[in-house]
Amino acid sequence: MLDPVIKGFGLGVVIAIMVGPVFFFILNTSIKRGFAPAAITAVGVMMSDVFFIMLAYFGSSFLLYLNDHKDATGIIGGIIIGGFGAILFFKEAKVAAESLEFVESPHPPLLYLAKGFMLNSVNPSVLLFWFVVGSTIPVKEQFTPTDTFVFYASTLGTVLGTDLIKAYLANRLKTIITAKSLILLNRVAGISLVVYGASMIIRVIWK
């Protein structure tokens, strides 16, 4: 049971340090509206991730087929996850710290929840990412249904926890975020995904 917790935590940390529109929206919301609206937004993002995980896991007719081809699944999944990492590594952050501030009218809590859900849901790479994760990692690791649930719970719990920390520290982060720091975050996340993908491939080869 500890193995899926550790692997889920590791993946959650990688996802948490990715810099994208969700990162900036949570940061902006906390800066301009306070911690509570930003926390609600983060919960909306998590709900979107849960939806995509269920869609990828239960809606994939390939899962049983992949379960019979674990080695090929591990290699292909490792290549794709590593590809995500390579893209992140070479992607430059073009958003400066000055653009973090924005002005908007107050909204009810449910609207912040909807904003977080929609902002995450309209990104097609989110579905692709969770499809790759859902159809490779649990299969390759030979997780039971309970292990798979724990893996996803650990991943999403880590992401939500770090999002709440980002929101809490937003006022401090505002003064230190620069284009260079965003590029560094992307590269750290990219290297982590490349290493994660490479480890999947190596375990198949050295099996």
Image (spheres, helix red, strand yellow):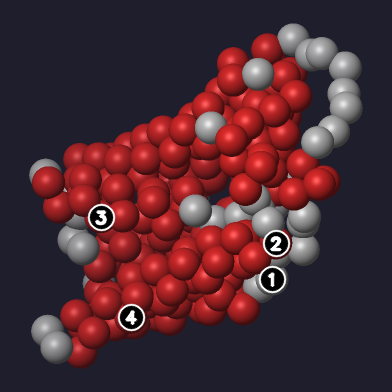
- Judged from this view, the residue extending furthest toward the bottom is 205
- Judged from this view, the residue extending furthest toward the top is 108
Q: Residues within 10 Å of mark 4 (few under 14, many from 20)?
A: some
> Along the polypeptide, which appears first: circle 2 or circle 3?
3
Q: What's the amino acid at mark 1?
A: Glu
Between residue 48 and residue 20, name the one nearer to us. Answer: 20
Q: Circles 1 and 2: CB distance less than 8 Å?
A: yes
> Along the polypeptide, which appears first: circle 3 or circle 4?
3
Measuring 59% from the left and 16% from the top, which residue is drawn there?
36
SS class of the residue under badge 1?
Answer: loop
Q: From the viewer's perspective, tell me whether residue 149 is left or right of residue 206.
A: right
Report the Cα–Cα distance between label 1 and label 4. 23 Å
Report the Cα–Cα distance between label 3 and label 1. 28 Å
Q: Which residue is mark 2?
A: 179
Measuring 37% from the left and 40% from the top, which residue is drawn there?
158
- Residue 99 appears anywhere in the view: yes
Q: What's the amino acid at mark 4?
A: Ala
> Along the polypeptide, which appears first: circle 3 or circle 1?
3
Q: Residues within 10 Å of mark 2 (few under 14, many from 20)?
A: some
Residue 174 tag number: none
Q: Circles 3 and 4: CB distance less than 8 Å?
A: no
Q: Which residue is mark 3?
A: 7
Measuring 54% from the left and 56% from the top, which residue is drawn there?
18
SS class of the residue under badge 2?
Answer: helix
Residue 198 tag number: 4
> Along the polypeptide, which appears first: circle 2 or circle 4?
2
Residue 92 tag number: 1
SS class of the residue under badge 4?
Answer: helix
> Along the polypeptide, which appears first: circle 1 or circle 4?
1
